[in-house]
Amino acid sequence: MRSFSEIEDIARDRHGAALEDRIGNGPASPAELAKVPEDRWLAQFTKSVFQAGFNWKVIEAKWDGFEEAFRGFDVDACAFMAEDWFEDLTTDTRIVRNPIKIRTVQANAQMIADMREKGGAGVVIGGWPSEDFVGLLAHLKAHGSHLGAASGQYALRFLRRDGFILSRDVVARLVAEGVVDKAPTSKKAMAAVQAAFNAWRDQSGASLVRISRVLALSV
């Protein structure tokens, strides 16, 4: 497995002076994430779930309608969604009327409400150790709805939580470095991915976000 500096050199050879702009901003701090209101966590989880397998631009164009239809993503209201409200949502033209995905809003609101016992979503998610990012992903998958695979990873990235996205290019680099032999899905493979990111993080002091972006840009 190459060192992070070697992979960064590959990315720099490919993109030159534009590399830093393409890497973009780093993650927010745990203190900053702790201040994110719980309705914004639910909103982003919902957006990522609805964008999965769909045209992202369509969801963006309708987003104001989503905010209205789901009552500003008030966590208590969504967690205790009445059946008549659910039925109304399935015919509400302000949103994408996918009943399965509409149901995820209630389940994910319940997960966020449960996090209040430990200080709230911002504290729990923001304070989760970066060296166990796969543990956070597993938690969202187990306790939320449709937040496994890419949806949870993208939601956390948009919320500026430190972490990686296992995009096609990132996986290609991980395969090239012998970390995995295909897109990781098993617990063993995800542990190997985390170990590799931790090693690169220890070598460089870089965030998981930066490492993830550099890996993607090295392909």
Image: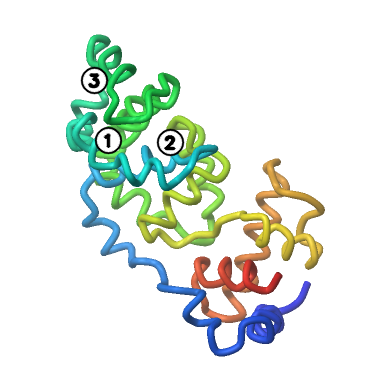
Q: What residue lies at 32% left-to-right and 25% top-to-bottom?
A: 106
160 left or right of 87 in image: right
- Across and down, in percent, residue 217 comes to 63, 72
Q: What residue lies at 40% left-to-right and 59% top-to-bottom?
A: 161
What number is the disc on residue 66?
1
Element type at mark 3: loop
68 left or right of 206 in image: left
- Across and down, in percent, residue 90 comes to 33, 17
Choose the circle earlier in sequence order: 1 or 2: 2
Mark 1 and mark 2: Cα distance apart in space: 10 Å
Which quarter of the image is occupied by the N terminus?
bottom right
Q: Which amino acid does label 1 sit on?
A: Phe
Instruction: Out of 92 and 87, give the one closest to the viewer.
Output: 92
**Splitting the image into 4 quarters, where does residue 97 fall?**
top left
- Could you tell me if the residues under marks 3 and 2 are in contact, i.e. CB atoms within 8 Å? no
Residue position marked by numbered label 3 in the rendering: 80
**Splitting the image into 4 quarters, where does residue 67 fall?**
top left
Q: What residue lies at 33% left-to-right and 62% top-to-bottom?
A: 30
Residue position marked by numbered label 2 in the rendering: 50
Element type at mark 1: helix
Choose the circle earlier in sequence order: 1 or 3: 1
Q: What residue lies at 26% left-to-right and 44% top-to-bottom?
A: 120
Mark 3 and mark 2: Cα distance apart in space: 20 Å
Q: Which amino acid does label 2 sit on?
A: Phe
Which quarter of the image is occupied by the C terminus?
bottom right
- Could you tell me if the residues under marks 1 and 2 are in contact, i.e. CB atoms within 8 Å? yes
